Image (cartoon, rainbow, N blue to C red):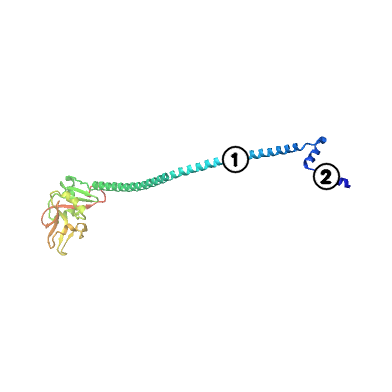
Amino acid sequence: MSNQETLDSSLRFLQSPSESKNRLRPGGIQIPGKTDGKEFSVSWHLFVVTVGILCLLLLVTVRVLGTVIFQCIKEKHQQEEILRKLIPQYDSIRNNNYSKEQLLINKTLECGILKNQTLHQKKELDSLFMEKMRCHIKQEIFSKSLQSTGKFNEDHWSCCGVNCYYFTSENENWMGCKETCESYNLSLLKIDDEDELNFVQRQTYRDSYWIGLSYNATESKWKWIDSGMSSGINFKIMSLPSGRRGKCAFLSSIRIADIDCAKKYKCICEKRTDCDFTPCFN
C-alpha cells in the first residue's frame, strides 16, 4: 500500500460518524447536521416512551399484586377471626359431647344394674312362686278303702318341698304316735329349721300335736327320734327345762312345750318324697 492510500484511510477514520453516514447514502447526497439531531431525538423519544410504558405496566402489576395481597391478608384476618370465634364453640360442643358420652355411659351402667336387679327380682318372684306352689296345702279326705293300710279317717296331708306331713285326727300318747307313724313307714316330725316350724304351725290350727322330740334321761338332754339335733331350731327348745324324765315335746300354733309323754295328743308324721305335687303316702 502506498503512502497516499495510507493517508486517505487515516483521514476517513478521523471523519465524524455523521459525515461517514452522509457519504454512505445513495446518490452521494449528504444530510445537514440538523437532520442528524432529529434522528437522534426520535430514537430517544421512542426509548423513553417504551420505558414509560414498561414502568406503567410495572406500576399496574404492582398495584394489582398489592390489591391481591391486601385482599388475601384481609381474608386471612377474617378467617382467623371466624376461627377464633369458632374455637370456643368447638370446645363447648366437645365438652357437651363428652358430658353426653359420660351420661350415656352412666345411663348404660344404670340400665345394666336395673336389668340385673330386674332379673334378680324376677328370679326371686319365680322362687317365691315356686315355693308357694310347692308349699301349698294338700288336704285330702281318704276313703275307707285305704283303711286296710291304716286308720286314715278324715286326716290330711300338707306338703312343702320334698317333705310331706301327715296330721292324724286321733289322740294318742307320745309312744303311740311314734308307733302309728312307723306303721305307715313314716316318722314323728323332726323340725330342721325356722321355716319348717312356721309352715307346720300354720297347719295345727287350735290343736296340739306330738313331735319327735323327747327327754333322754340317760344323756340328760333333749333329743330327736333320730338321735340328732336340729341346729336351726335349738333356740326354740332351749326354753325346755332339763331333768324332765318322762317328758316329751308337743307343738301348737304358738309354741313348743313339754308335758308328760302319757298325755294324749294328735300326731304329726313326716315323710320325705323326691317328687313334688304328688301324693305323699306310698
Q: Is residue 158 visible?
A: yes
Q: Position of residue 138 (x, y in %)?
A: 20, 46
Q: Amino acid at mark 2?
A: Leu
91 horizontally vs 281: left or right: right
**Mark 1 neighbour density, 10 Å: few (under 14) some (14–19) many (20 or more):** few
Q: Amino acid at mark 1?
A: Leu
47 is higher (above) or lower (below) than 272:
above
Give the number of the mark in front: 1 or 2.
Answer: 2
Foreground residue, 145 or 37? Answer: 37
Foreground residue, 81 or 268? Answer: 81
Residue at the image position 19 percent from the left and 48 percent from the top: 157
Residue at the image position 75 percent from the left and 37 percent from the top: 34
Q: Is residue 184 visible?
A: no
Q: Which residue is mark 1?
A: 59
Q: Which residue of the protein is positioned furthest toward the right in this rendering?
A: 2
Res 45 → quadrant: top right
Q: Which residue is mark 2?
A: 11
Q: Secondary structure at mark 2?
A: helix
Residue at the image position 14 percent from the left and 57 percent from the top: 249
Q: Position of residue 264 (x, y in %)?
A: 11, 54
Q: Position of residue 57 (x, y in %)?
A: 61, 39
